[in-house]
Image: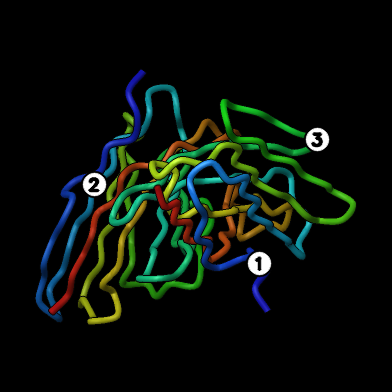
Amino acid sequence: ETGVTQSPTHLIKTRGQQVTLRCSSQSGHNTVSWYQQALGQGPQFIFQYYREEENGRGNFPPRFSGLQFPNYSSELNVNALELDDSALYLCASSLWDRGSTFGSGTRLTVV
Amino acid sequence: KNEVEQSPQNLTAQEGEFITINCSYSVGISALHWLQQHPGGGIVSLFMLSSGKKKHGRLIATINIQEKHSSLHITASHPRDSAVYICAVRSTRNYGGATNKLIFGTGTLLAVQP
């Protein structure tokens, strides 16, 4: 079975730009959650997608949005990037409410 | 106060030592994860448990649901065990419909010296 793959691994963007991060779920998993991990902090829940619909959201503004595709892969989009958006973005897939498999993350730097 | 608290925040050990990392939480949970994160890297799930104890190689995880406490033990520690160990709980609270949402502790940075 394949694990969770995230791309790109590293990314540098300028303040005000938009970014799209991608996640391929583990085979057989239908739920994807996205987390933001700032330096020295634990990951914070952004949102979750199940069957292509948002299924819960953490305390993040609307400029953080996502998509889930029929093959259960997912995208995280962030508009109007701010310096504080610099973080490691983690994707975790699961089969509904069972154990999660994490990707290696995308390191986003906003300058 | 964070819903998930870990201790210690930093831990330095000598190779071969027995290590314990603690996690306390204040919410109702359906499961608890112990995760490992290497510097700059992604997260690897070590254990998911909802009761009792689990063992995998030199790693042992225990949980006491009544006391809302879990421990991760590493026996015969080795420099390759150096990483951040994170406790995360799956809360039973409904976050706008999200299931399997995890609440993370801030991690314990472990350094095992040869």
Q: CA distance from mark 3 to mark 1?
A: 20 Å
Is A33 left, or right, of A5 in this rendering? Answer: right
Are the residues flagged by discs 3 and 2 from a single subunit? no
Is A36 left, or right, of A59 in this rendering? Answer: left
Chain under callout 1? B
Q: Position of residue A92 (x, y in %)?
A: 42, 43
Is B89 left, or right, of B66 in this rendering? Answer: left
Q: Nearer the viewer, residue B35 or B79?
A: B79
Q: Position of residue B64 (x, y in %)?
A: 83, 47
Foreground mark, 3 or 2, reads 3
Q: Residue at x 59, y 27 (%)?
A: B56
Tell me the residue that label 2 is attached to.
Answer: A22
Q: Position of residue B7 (x, y in %)?
A: 64, 65
Looking at the rendered structure, the kind of residue marked 3 is: Gly
Tell me the residue that label 1 is attached to.
Answer: B5
Tell me the residue that label 3 is attached to.
Answer: B52
Are the residues flagged by discs 2 and 1 from a single subunit? no
Residue A85's mark?
none
Q: CA distance from mark 2 to mark 1?
A: 31 Å
Q: Nearer the viewer, residue A11 or B73?
A: B73
